[in-house]
Image (tube, rainbow, N blue to C red):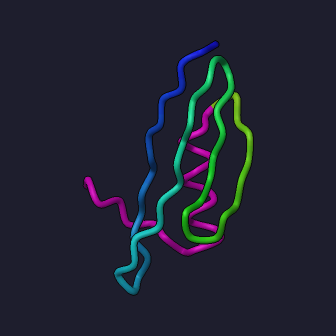
Amino acid sequence: MPSSTTSKVSRWDQHGREHVVQVRKSGMTRALTCSTCAWRRPAQFLPWLKAEEHLAEAHQATVDPTA
């Protein structure tokens, strides 16, 4: 059974609210889950980019808290 690891992509919107997409890796596939709207999507390639795109399009969350 493949091990599972989890990371996250978080961005802030213009109102100061944090939005997070969890990236769960299991084997070669990754599953994306938005904690704000329960959006889910499998992603084999570029999962963090897809998570950033979802946050920008669905929640207008573009401010990177690490920058």
- Residue 46, image x and y in percent? 61, 34
- Quick check: 29 above or below 18? above
Between 55 and 8, the residue placed more toward the observer is: 8
> Hey, which residue is sitting farthest left in the picture?
67
Q: At x 56% / y 63%, what residue is drawn?
A: 55
Q: Classify residue 26 by image quadrant.
A: top right
- Residue 63, image x and y in percent? 38, 66
Which part of the image, by quadrant, shows the C terminus?
bottom left
Q: At x 35% / y 59%, what residue is drawn?
A: 64
Residue numbers of the magenta segment: 46-67
- Residue 12, image x and y in percent? 39, 70
- Quick check: 20 above or below 14? above
Magenta stretch containing residue 58, yes or no?
yes
Magenta stretch containing residue 1, yes or no?
no
Between 56 and 4, the residue placed more toward the observer is: 4
> Hey, which residue is sitting farthest front in the picture?
1
> Hey, which residue is sitting farthest bottom in the picture?
15
Which part of the image, by quadrant, shows the N terminus?
top right
- Residue 44, image x and y in percent? 70, 28
Q: Is residue 28 left or right of residue 55?
A: right
Q: At x 34% / y 81%, what residue is drawn?
A: 16
Q: How many marks?
A: 0
Q: At x 40% / y 71%, what residue is drawn?
A: 18
Q: Is residue 1 left or right of residue 66?
A: right
